Structures are given as C-alpha cells and as structure tokens.
Amino acid sequence: MDGSHRRGLVVGGIAAVAILAILFVVVGAGSVVDTLLSADRSLVAATFGLALCWLIAWSLMLRTVLGSLGVELPVTTAFLVYAGAVFANNVTPFGQAGGEPVAAALISRVSGSRYETGLVGIASVDVLNVVPSISLVLLGVGYRATTAAVGERLEVAVGVAVGLIAAIVAAIALGWRYRRGVLDRVPSAVAGVFGRLERFDAESLEARLADRLRNFFEDIERVGTSRGRLTVAVALSLTGWVFQAAALTTAFAAVGHPISPAIPLFVVPLAYVAGATPLPGGLGGIEAAFVALLVPTTGVPASAITAAVLVFRGAVYWMPVAVGGVSASTLGVRAVR
C-alpha cells in the first residue's frame, strides 16, 4: 500500500469513527450499550450464521461467473477468494469501486488467470447484484405503500438509489456500445500522458493497454453470452440478498424488537447506497443510513435500531473482514510459494 492509499484509508477511518460517534451521541450511547448487553445470544449467533450463508451464496455466484470465463475454482477456494474480495471492499474507500482492483489481483493469483479476467469476474458479480437489489427495493416499497404511508425520507432514498443505479447502468451500456472507440483512443491517450515520464515507454505502454482492454471486453462478452450461468448467478445473488434481510430481521429479534421481514428486504439494498461514499466499505455511512431508514419504517426506538444494526453489521461487515483478511493473506502467501 503506497502513501496516498494509506493516507486515504486513515482519513476514511477517522471519518467513519466520527460518524459512528455522532450516531451514538444522537441516539444515546448508554441505551445502545444496554440493549446490546441484554441481546439474546442465540439469536445473535443466528444473525452471524445467516450472514455466513449470504457469504457462501455470493461466493458461489463468483464461482459461477468465473466458470463462464473458463476459470474453475473449487467451492472452498471460491469462498476464500470471495471473502478476500469482501475484505478488500471493506477496507478501501468507495466500497466495491475501491476494492475491485485488489480482488481482481487476488483472483488472478489464485486461479492463474489474467488480471483483467479477474476484474471482469468480480465486476460482473457487483453489477449482477444490482438486478435483484433494485427489484427488492421496488417490490418492498410497493408492498409498504399498500400497508402504510411511504414517508418523504423513504421516497428520497428510493429516488437516489434508482438514480445512482440508472447512472451506473447507463455508463456501462455506453462503454460497451462504444467499446471499439475506447479500444482505439484510450490506450494512445493514456500512453501519451504517461509517455512523457522517463520511466514509461509510450509505444510499449500503448500496446499493453490495448491488449488488456481487448481481453477485458472479450471476457465481458463471454459472461454476457453464458445465459445459463447468468441465470444461476442472478438466482444466487437474490438468495444472498434474502439471507442478509433475514439476518437483519433476526438482529432485531435478538435485541427484543421483532419487525416485519418485509422491511429489511428493501431497507438492506437501499442502505448500501451509502457504500459509495469515500469511507472504508461505507463504514459509518451505512450504519447511519440504516438508522435513518428504519426509524420511520419500524416505529422502534432509535437506540434499539442502532443496537440491531450494530449486531447486523458485525455479522456482514466485521466477520467478513476477519475471515477475508486471513484468507487473503493465506491465498496470497500460497500464490507466492
């Protein structure tokens, strides 16, 4: 990790701690701690178990996508690789956008595939996760509208999420449509800039970039034409989202405030929009987003909501950080050997 990345991680970590501290002050730190201490331990364990099921489902999703690229991984290795990818996402700013290059390098090392193949694999998983998530949001909010009034805060959150997802999808679609122009112009433009530095040879840099971009687009096309594997991948994505929603529902039961299982189905993907902030894995921002969305939709006290969210985030954030950190280190050492 170079100096700029280290500084970015430190600044993001400080910001995350500051947001969490403000959240604790606003909702009442003492009440949150008391609620956590009185939580049902068996249900807390069940929350972590459901989070583990989510991690397994999405690791199988990554395995399925990589299979369409000709990269075959054993189930256990796929789990360790995906856990390492989640670890990278959770400790770098901007969530997936910051962790994907690290995850791609890990996939490449373990499987012996090209770096761009690993990048297409992990990026495809992130993009495919959008389809079930936006579907759950729209279905969940629609169901909510039939049983209770949809508050302004929820309307704004849905609008922001849909707008952001639409922008990402549009950017991907434009990049694909004009991929030949990208292949023709981007390598020469980048090489022209870096070629002015003594350490880079413009001609060889342009050739390498063109080759990598060509492989990247070819791999995307291979994923897109594997209809059967795409269907399985989307089904596994939906399964993972449902496991996360079930984990949040169980976390609320653990702190003594059961809620309707329908609410987490749309709150979970909505809250993750905050992961696009320059915070390590959205830490702090995502917790605040959960509380902001759950207060008006559940009627549960803010301190109890915060306690439930902390149990949930312990399962879906800190557990993958621990497991993924160990697996990334282990797989990296194994690859070097």
Image (tube, rainbow, N blue to C red):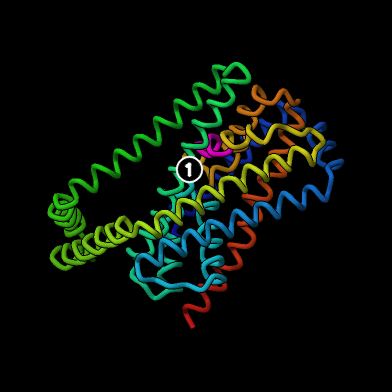
Count of numbered labels shown in the rendering: 1
Q: Residue at x 71, y 34 (%)?
A: 306
Q: At label 1, which amino acid type do we have? A: Pro
| Image-based side of 114 in relation to 141, left or right | left
Q: Is 329 on the left-hand or right-hand side of 4?
A: right
Q: Is residue 271 magenta?
A: yes
Along the line of sight, which residue is nearer the eye, 191 or 78?
A: 78
**For the point 35% across and 66% down, which residue is it?**
69
Q: Position of residue 133 (x, y in %)?
A: 49, 40
**Image position of 25 with respect to 92: above or below:** above
Q: x and y percent of residue 128 in the render? A: 42, 49
Is 7 part of what is drawn in magenta?
no
Q: In this view, which residue lies farthest toward the front?
A: 228
Say which quarter of the image contains residue 125. Answer: bottom left
Q: Is residue 300 toward the left or the right of residue 329 in the image?
A: right
> Which element is circle 1 on?
helix
Pick the residue in front: 111 or 18.
111
Q: Which residues are magenta?
A: 268-274
Which residue is denoted by mark 1 in the rendering?
132
Residue at point 42%, 58% (across, down): 122
Q: Magenta span: helix, strand or loop, mainly?
A: helix
- Residue at 27% across / 43% down in the picture? 173
Q: Position of residue 205 (x, y in %)?
A: 19, 64
- Percent coordinates x, y for residue 315 in the rendering: 67, 50
Callout 1 environment at 10 Å: few (<14), some (14 to 19), or many (20+)?
A: many
